[in-house]
Image (cartoon, grey):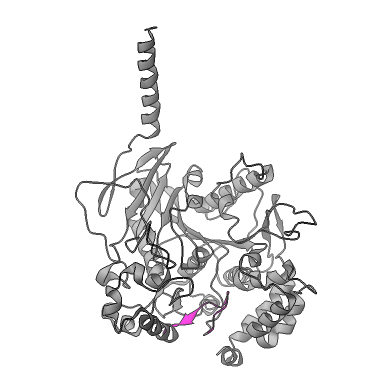
Amino acid sequence: MNHPFFRCLFTVGALLCVFSAAYTQPTPAKVEGGLVQGTSEDGLTVFRGIPFAAPPVGELRWKAPQPVARWEGLRETKKFAPAPIQGGSPPSGKSEDCLYLNVWSPAKSAGERLPVLVWIYGGGFSFGATSDPNYSGENLAKKGVVLVSIAYRVGPLGFLAHPELSNETAQHVSGNYGLLDMIAGLQWVQKNIAAFGGDPGKVTIFGESAGGIAVSMLCASPLAKGLFHGAISQSGGSFGPSRPTTYPGENMKRLRQAEKEGEAYAQKAGASSLAELRKIAADKLPGGWGVGSAWPIVDGYVIPDDQSKLYEAGKYNHVPVLVGYNSDEGASFSPPKTSQEYIESTKKRYGKFADDLLKAYPVGESNVPKTARDLMRDAAFGWQTWNWARLQAKTSKAKVFYYYFDQHPDYPADSPKAGSGSGHGLEVSYVFEHLNPSNPQTTKTDLAISDAMGTYWTNFAKYGDPNGKGVPKWPVFSQASPTVMYFSQTPHTGPVPDAASLEVLNRYFEWRRTPEGETWAK
């Protein structure tokens, strides 16, 4: 056995054993469509690219998702499915056939009934994909949850409204197909997640940016009732009133206006009818940010009404929520470059409330500091989550937990980033625990914050409450005690950030819902 030949055989055999142990094939899972085969990866069972609805192509374009056709034999689900067609970019790696989901499960058997976290990606409802490396679910799954990520149609393919679509028989919807995709994905989870060791009675949805906004919409949609039992929204919320000319935080349009814009979109595409529009190849349709209807609408079906009004009336899905936002979101959305631009844009958007808001969010003499950028932050995210937290605390027994993410480097005084905070989306890699410990810019406090957030998020999925062993106490947010968890160097509690400024902004949003405010917005 000491001969070099035998030593080589032994070494090769050992390597093959290690390789096969790392990449063994788990027992196939049985889902509605048939059997799916995943992979074993570092103690987890992982399935990528499981279809949860029929391909929304041909006559199914701009229709509610339909059931998956059954398949024979074993379907390999080891690679991510293509991202949805988006943004007018080349179709490489993207497809109209995009309704697939992924599962990371630590369960050793189907009978474990572990809590489930379902991720909904962001991207302004115009971009996004479950295959983004930042969304890979292995680290959260290792904390004792089944992690699912679901895809949905984006851009005009996901949200186009049109009179012909509204009039189609057997359809109750025009636009909002992307939201219906999410609901179909959650229905699939209810029917199938037990096969992966998940508990269909303990499902929490979570998302960031447009994904967080979608979470708030699902919380208000009667079509999603009973499909989830907790909700986490990172930099999301849809509590602003509808407006013909939209702005961040006032993104919603009503069906009639969206239908008119859909007709203009069809004309731009060179189609004189819906039938012609459906025949155009997906990658040949007009695309890009803001082209056509690329945002959910108040359609009276998926989204019944102004969400603030629904919450005031208690007409929403009463589940525990964990909501929050980042300290410098405004830096990520092309803020005005000069003081004058900031003043002019504020007056254009806020009308008679502009002067009060310019005092609450002051600008520098020659620059636009964070104090001014925070108006954009709060209009789009801060006020949305604050209003959500307050309304639910007022009208529901379901608990509310509120956070503020402010983890970032201390920039030197002479740095262009001096005075900056945490930008939009920065917290995602912390939540999914994808920080690179070997990166010299990753600090011990970064890793500690990331571990704490991953623990809080998975605790919330397990118990409907983020608290547990090894993490500081996170108090429930209430009207009497509006306490916020700060993620900044260490997790610690504090008051609502910039509360006085939020109150000024709140007066604007209240006015916008008056007859005078509605008339002005038109």
Q: Is residue 224 left or right of residue 353?
A: left
Q: In front here: 173 or 165?
A: 165
The residue at the far top in this view is 2
Q: Is residue 109 visible?
A: no
Q: Is residue 375 visible?
A: yes
Q: Position of residue 494 (x, y in %)?
A: 72, 59
Residue 75 vertical position relative to residue 496 in the rendered view, above or below: above
The N terminus - image quarter:
top left
Residue ID at (68%, 44%): 443
The number of numbered discs placed on residues in the rendered structure image is 0
Instruction: Locate residue 65, reporting x and y percent.
Output: 31, 67
Question: Up-down: is 432 above or below 401?
Answer: above
Magenta region includes residue 254? yes
The x and y percentages for residue 451 are: 60, 45
Q: Is residue 410 above or below residue 163?
A: above
Residue 478: x and y, percent? 64, 66
| Left/right of residue 152 with respect to residue 383 in the rendered view | left
In the rendered image, which quarter contains the C terminus? bottom right
In-image side of 82 versus 485 (left or right): left
- Rendered residue at 53%/73% (across/down): 238
Magenta span main SS: loop
- The quadrant holding residue 17 is top left
Left or right: 76 in relation to 338: left
Q: Is residue 482 magenta?
A: no
Nearer-the-camera pick, 434 or 368? 368
Q: Which residues are magenta?
A: 245-255
Toward which corner of the image does residue 111 lie, by quadrant? top left
